Image: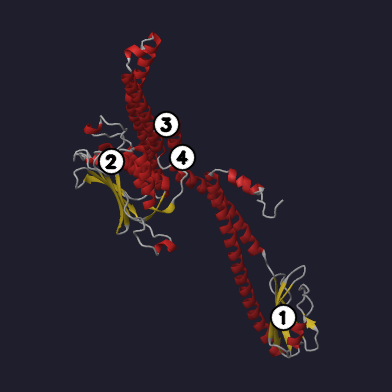
Amino acid sequence: MSRHARREPSRLTRWWRRQSLRTRLTVIAATAIAVSVFLAFQVASELMDRKLQDTAEEQLRADSRVLATDVERAGPAQVQLRPYPGSGRLVRVILPDGSTRTPAGQPALPPVSKSAARVARGGPADVMESIGGTEGYLIYTLRAGGGAVQVASLADDSPINEFGFGMLLIGLLCVAGGALVGRTVARTALAPVDRLTAAAVRVAHTRDLDADIPDEGGGEIRRLIQSINNMLAALRDSRQAQRLLAEDAAHELKTPLTSLRVNVELLIRLDRRGTLDSALPAESRTRLLNDLGAQVVELSTLAAELTDLARGDVTDESTALLDLADVVVAAATRARSRMPDIELALDVNSVWVSGRPAALQRAVLNLIDNAGKWSPEDQPIQVRLCAQGASAVLEVDDAGPGIDAADAPRVFDRFYRADSARGLPGSGLGLSIVQRVVDAHGGRAAVSRSARGGALLRVELPAASPPAPIAQLTAGEHSPMR
């Protein structure tokens, strides 16, 4: 196995991932409270222990000063030690020779330590010691009367233990309460999410995209609901656009299919009767066959345009830095092969853009095809490309009748055809494809009347900086062409 092989998640991690968000919030709340109580207990225990230690030491110092006063007055060997009352502090006098005196009936203290012996021999003035064993003692030694006095007390952990037991009960109650509060908060906080989930499931089940989810809650929940409603609105628009595309396509396909069927049925019927040659002279038969061929070409063009339009922006073609002049020249070459009777006059200058070559060439070809439908045979279609500021500007100018002002706002709509164009071949999709390609490249398309009285279709695209070696060449590398 590779050293970088993916490590399997632990059992705890798998369990955690299987839990609902409500359970996770409950566990997190209970764990947070448990950790907080534990840390509070540790800090409080430490502070309480220090406080009790300081209090005990202060009491031992006070008692030792009283005993030291008696020893100074009577001497270590003669001072009278009252019998041990059975509880309380323990005392001991250390004589100069190292021997000790204790009250009658008092429990034995641990042996004199080296530190306490040094105090009795005239060393340090006092020393506080904590001596362990089966029973821990806190012993204070104070120099007095040529020897020393000691006052001791048993180390009592009962207050700490009682405090710890109380904190444990409080902690358990807090953890249980925290789990309950966490569950309640999770249920309340996730209620909008539950309703949102139910609404989303209902929409998925009924396929009713018109049912907006009620906008409730606040903050992240509201933004989530608004995002889902925006998504539903986009889906509604998309479904409506698909429905309109299907209806318009069916309408546009109906006429050429009907005409094609009628002509084919006529040929089949005459052929079956054996009267094809007599009923249709050669000239009429040729005209009918040419009509059939034109209808097939129109259907093929319409199918290709519908496919291109239905795909939208779904394409595998990548964006590249390209010279738009090359695209225009390639589109003009294709247009000349499709319309040999139409003359094209190119005035093309090098302008670099960032875009998809095939899509741009299709858009330019559609512009030229549209102009070819209207331009007289004796008048050339003028195609101009130049840079204006930060834009690449392409203009296609024909000498036809032009576009009426009432039709100008809708010339880029799908399947829209002006009244004057209904007798001409075409589907009304060419310019809508141009609009889509231009929009995808961040540009804009417009139509106006040209100086020759025809239509002037103008496309503006954001210009880009050419590659470094080409940037040194002149902008007019592509000379005007005809």
Locate residue 403, reporting x and y percent. 21, 40
Residue position marked by numbered label 2 in the rendering? 371
Tell me if I can see residue 231 in this picture: yes
In front: label 4 or label 1: 4
Mark nearer the viewer, 1 or 2: 2
Amino acid at circle 3: Arg
The CA distance from mark 1 to mark 3 is 91 Å
Answer with mark 4 or mark 1, whichever residue precedes in sequence: 1
Sequence-wise, the earlier of marks 4 and 2 is: 4
Could you tell me which residue is drawn at 60 percent across and 71 percent down? 51
The color scheme shown is secondary structure
- Residue 4 placement, left or right of 434: right
- As measured in the structure, the alpha-carbon distance from the residue carrying label 4 to the one carrying label 2 is 58 Å
The circle drawn on residue 249 is none
What residue does disc 1 label?
A: 150
Q: Is residue 457 left or right of residue 189?
A: left
Q: Are marks 4 and 2 in contact (CB under 8 Å)?
A: no
Q: Earlier in the sequence, mark 3 or mark 2?
A: 3
The residue most toward the front is 282
Which of the two labelled residues, at mark 1 and mark 3, occupies the earlier sequence position? 1
Disc 1 marks a residue whose amino acid type is Gln
Q: Label 2: how many residues lie within 10 Å, few (<14), some (14-19) or many (20+)? A: many
Is the residue under label 3 in contact with that under label 1 (CB below 8 Å)? no
The image shows residue 73 at horizontal and vertical percentages of 69, 90
- 68 or 18, which lies in front? 18
Given the image, on which type of amino acid does mark 4 rest? Asp
Task: Please give the residue where the numbered disc 4 appears in the rendered image.
Answer: 194
